[in-house]
Amino acid sequence: MRALDIITKKRDQQTLSKEEIHFLIDGYTRHQIPDYQMAAWAMAVQLNGMNHEEITDLTLAMANSGEILDLSSFDSVIVDKHSTGGVGDKTTISVAPMVAACGLYVGKMSGRGLGYSGGTIDKLESIPGFKVALSTDQFITQLQKIGIVLAGQSLDLAPADGKLYALRDATGTVPSIPLIASSIMSKKIAAGADAIVLDVKVGKGAFMKDIDSARELAEVMVEIGKLSNRRVIALLSAMDQPLGNAVGNALELVEAVKMLKGEAPADYYEHCISIAAYMLLIANKANNLKNARQLVEATVKDGSAFNKLCELTEAQHGDTSCLIDLSKLPKASYVETILAPQTGYISELNAQIIGEACVVLGGGRAKKEDNIDPSVGIILHAKIGDRVEEGQKLLDVHYNRPQVIQDAIDKLKLAVKIDELPVEPPPHNLGVIGL
Ligand code: URA
């Protein structure tokens, strides 16, 4: 078998066999197939697609390229969630403790932010001392002991995805449904969870810009889940505007912690309750969605979810006093406020542009190896559909480097549109697949 023949086959829109896909992924993982051939193949997939069988074969080949966590010794279901990525999406930090406080094991590996899209691991690292690099043994021991782990992606799990994702990022082959679906699901399968809730984002700040492609991605991932004996459902949720009011690592952490104290913006509160309730439902911890919602809401009201976050933080060497006194988290030196230039209704708060402005401030990475500033970011004072008066506060920009503030403000002004006529707040939940 030769990589060249597999590349030309996909270029000519033919279907690849399981053996061919395995040969390619195995050879790439073992450095026997060079980046330039893998990049050519990824572009052929980007342009010509793959059928469901090819995508499943690709997913399993990537999952099997490294270690697969064996969590079969646990006495109950292990549940996981995954978001396809967006702006202001700090859901995991609120939802994982809520679900763990309901008595389920939540063992989750999360990613860092890349480009305008944020990452849970960067947000958690705003807590001084919080350690995200755990060995497999530490991951399993902590999960057994306290029922919750939020760790960075282990290099031993699905290493083929790690290599391929970096290559895709540099070759214009990220927005391909087969490549995204196999990338996400290979990591989920390798991380060992029995039940997974996927949060597929749709809109200006998401990989999937329209509902049809988001639905297709969700359906493919649910299908892969079935074929690999995992319980998987996918929620489709809006990402035209940021989720909640905070964008930027420490600012988002504050919002995620406040959620556990019952003080969250309405869209973020509803999103967290909904994701957590579906996690309970697919893990058979509740017999219907209403009951599941009551159970997760109770963990906010009685403080058990917040206590679980403190337990998690302590186990991972973070300073829990910062969760009790949020003013101890990293803070930017300056805040510049953008005011509404006219009276009217907010009709656009472009999530991608707001995410890019956060990168300009230093809160995200242009390249994988860049350092980030946890304290910078943006607070939204109004959301789509809200009425604003001329001169009213629209956005607060938290920054440290005066030389970048004008660039960020210029961008942010382009992100906001105000109409004279009333605008309906857009729906957030756009459907559920795989129930
Ligand atoms: N998230 C992933 O893990 N992989 C992708 O390809 C896209 C989003």
Image: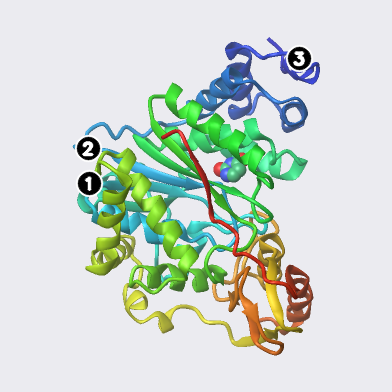
Looking at the image, can residue 139 be seen? no
Looking at the image, can residue 101 be seen? yes
For residue 148, side relative to residue 273 (left or right): left
Q: Which residue is mark 3?
A: 9
What x and y, as percent, mark residue 192?
Answer: 37, 35
Q: CA distance from mark 1 to mark 3?
A: 47 Å
Disc 2 + disc 1, Cβ < 8 Å: yes
Q: Which residue is mark 1?
A: 144
Ligand 1 falls in quadrant: top right
For residue 105, side relative to residue 108 (left or right): left
Residue shown at 50% from the left, 72% from the top: 250
Q: CA distance from mark 2 to mark 1?
A: 7 Å
Quadrant location, the C terminus: top left
Q: Which residue is mark 2?
A: 74
- Residue type for callout 3: Lys
Quadrant location, the N terminus: top right
